[in-house]
Image (cartoon, rainbow, N blue to C red):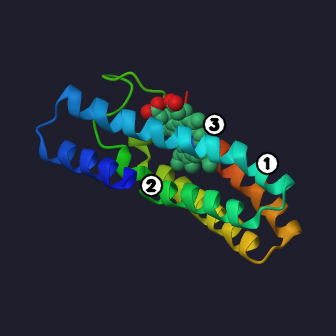
Amino acid sequence: MKQLVISTILFCSLLLPISVSAQSDVIAARKANFKQSGMAMRQMRTHIANADYEAIEKSATQIAAWAEQMPEFFPANSGPDTNKTSARAAIWNDFDTFTALAQNNHKAAMALGDAARNADNAGIMAAMQSLGQTCGACHSKFKD
Ligand code: HEC
């Protein structure tokens, strides 16, 4: 449902002529999604401590789903020159790299989900570390 609402917001913002309010909607939506990923990462530590494989898989799937959609939430004119956002202008100068980093994030989250499905503790620890690195790799390049 939430995904549907967010997709609807995005869809509408693409149909409307470029306006400040439409861009602020998509920015608010992406911030909410990132916040959710951050929360999922924090909760992951508890799930891992409890060896709760189902919960690990669920959180990983949620992170992966957002990573897959992420680039769509960075339309033109949603950068820092005209909006209140921590997204750097560099994103729109090198959108291919930004997209590739989002794909790395997606892949790493999927790998964590796979490790959880296999109850593979060593695999989970390794995948968790890689996943965290894919968040940091994009932030250090593209987020203030
Ligand atoms: C491909 C790039 C990219 C990846 C991958 C990425 N982020 Fe981000 N993240 C950003 C950008 C850009 C912003 C700033 C968004 C804005 O302010 O409009 C951001 C913002 C955030 C925020 C702040 C949201 C807010 O309230 O303003 C959190 C928390 C966050 N990211 C967590 C994560 C976590 C956790 C991961 C990994 C699971 C992750 N991000 C992966 C680019 C990325």
Q: Nearer the viewer, mark 2 or mark 1?
A: 1
The part of the image, by quadrant, that contains residue 101 is bottom right
CA gap, disc 2 to disc 1?
34 Å
Which is in the foreground here, disc 3 or disc 1? 1
Residue 50, x across and y down, in percent: 84, 56
Residue designated by label 3: 140
Q: Residues within 10 Å of mark 3 (few under 14, many from 20)?
A: few
Say if residue 87 shows up in the picture.
no
Q: Residue at x 32, y 34 (%)?
A: 78
Secondary structure beneath dot 2 equals helix
Image: 19 above or below 46 = above
Instruction: Return the mark for residue 96.
Output: 2
Residues packed near mark 2 inside 10 Å, few (<14), some (14 to 19) or many (20 plus): few
Task: Identify the mark nearer the N-term, 2 or 1.
Answer: 1
Quarter in which the C terminus is drawn = top right
Q: Give residue 46's mark.
A: 1
Looking at the image, is mark 3 or mark 2 earlier in the sequence?
2
User: What residue is shown at x 77% (from left), y 78% (from top)?
Assistant: 118
Nearer the N terminus, badge 3 or badge 1? 1
Which x, y percent locates residue 94? 44, 46
Q: Could you say whether the residue bearing mark 3 is in a helix, strand or loop?
A: helix
CA gap, disc 3 and disc 1:
26 Å
